[in-house]
Image (spheres, rainbow, N blue to C red):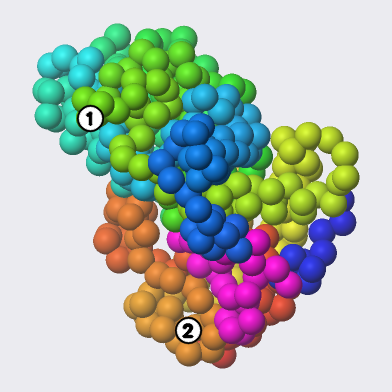
Amino acid sequence: MTYDVAAVRAHFPALEEGAAHFDGPGGTQAPRVVGEAMARTLTSAVANRGSVTRAERRAEETVAQCRSALADLLGADPRGVVIGRSMTDLTYDFARTLAKTWQPGDEIVVTRLDHDANVRPWVQAAEAVGALPRFADFDPTTGELAPDDIAAHLSSRTRLVAVTAAGNLIGTMPDIPAITALVRERTDARIYVDGVHYTAHESVDLPASGADFWACSPYKFLGPHCGVVAADPSLLESLQPDKLLPSTNEVPERFELGTLPYELMAGVTAAIDFHADLAGLHTGTRRERLIAAYAGIHHHERRLRDLLEPTLRDLPGVQVYSNAQRRTPTLLFTVDGWDSQQVRGALAERGINAPAGNFYAIECSRHLGLGDAGGVRVGLAPYTSEDDIVRLLDALRDLLV
């Protein structure tokens, strides 16, 4: 497919303000169709889900369409798609639910590459029942997290392995199928994958990943603020989350607390359809068009990363921490003699949004030797242009050369 970034950018009203956005890993800008879908749903007659009134049916259809769109995006079953307030919120819910089956002396494995949302909920749930958390380290020089790094912590008492598909701080993409195969071979543990950063850049196939649970956040891929966990419906059937007495016991609804946010779900559907349309195809299923579109996005972002990265690494005093062979178009860096927040502020004065911090990947930042301060993070998105790259590099040259 031919990727026309100028045509893509025309769909994003936020870009009209003129800033160059490198803050996508923290949340992307949204295309116009997403806002329109949300407004249309919010201002239409909507009621609690049902089949009697038109308002009830509209709510039911909105939920079904969202689950179907997410299933196409993730290669999942719509009956296994759980919607929540955020990925963090859902992960805490699943941690509490899974921990009901853990015993004192059981073990869980988490990694230092992960966002804390895929670390602390599991550690806290384990400690509450007397289970033991084990931390798998990554190589701070290469940024690589290898299957053997996790294997070293597996035992007959391992009940859960939580691992990221792409580290949000430095972009490392571990070999998830290899990790899940190894875990299956050696344990009966459940595998919970944080796919938040990965899903923004790569096509997902839940069964092929080998994961039991795949978590993601639509606002990282052009949608509104909410969270998603996808799993096999039969696995969800085996779990008993805390819920209100009159709430349905059907899945996935038994995991969804309160009335669903219909307007957000309409926005999620619109964001996924927007991605599918980027393929420029007029035939094929939505899933097929999404796979084609992600291939185009990947090629576009990789080309821009190849334009940015060599020059960034050559700037005086710059140290780049994103070094893994397989990684997203995300670069974390520091500058000798500069506080990263100073760099952030100086770029912001030039109309460039490149935030700094640890971005909740606190274990990762500390393991890299950056403490809690982290660094400056530059992330590319489907709407990033070559001009954005030039603006960033020119600004950094002005500051550092």
Residue 1 percent location from the top left of the image: 86, 50
Work out whether residue 309 or residue 226 is closer to the camera in this orientation and state it: 226
Q: Earlier in the sequence, mark 2 or mark 1?
A: 1
Residue 143: horizontal and vertical position, in percent?
A: 47, 47
Neighbor class of circle 1 (other Cα within 10 Å; few <14, some 14-19, many 20+) is: few
Q: Position of residue 217 (x, y in %)?
A: 47, 48
Look at 37% across and 59% down and name the residue there.
359
Residue 46: x %, y % from top left: 48, 49
Q: Is residue 2 left or right of residue 137?
A: right
Q: How many marks?
A: 2
The residue under the point 49% across, 34% down is 52
Q: Is residue 131 left or right of residue 50?
A: left
| Residue type beneath disc 2 | Ala
Q: Residue at x 38, y 75 (%)?
A: 340
- The image quadrant of residue 6 is bottom right
Which mark is on residue 244?
A: 1
- In the rendered image, the vertical position of residue 356 relative to residue 252, given as above or below: below
Q: Which residue is mark 2?
A: 348
| Circle 1 SS class | loop
Q: Are marks 2 and 1 in contact (CB under 8 Å)?
A: no
Q: Quadrant of residue 164?
A: top left
Q: Which residues are magenta?
A: 10-35
Residue at image point 42% right, 23% down: 251
The amino acid sitting under disc 1 is: Leu
Q: Residue 137, relative to residue 376: is it above or below?
A: above
Residue 33 is drawn in which quadrant? bottom right
Q: In what element is the residue under mark 2?
A: helix
Magenta segment includes 214: no
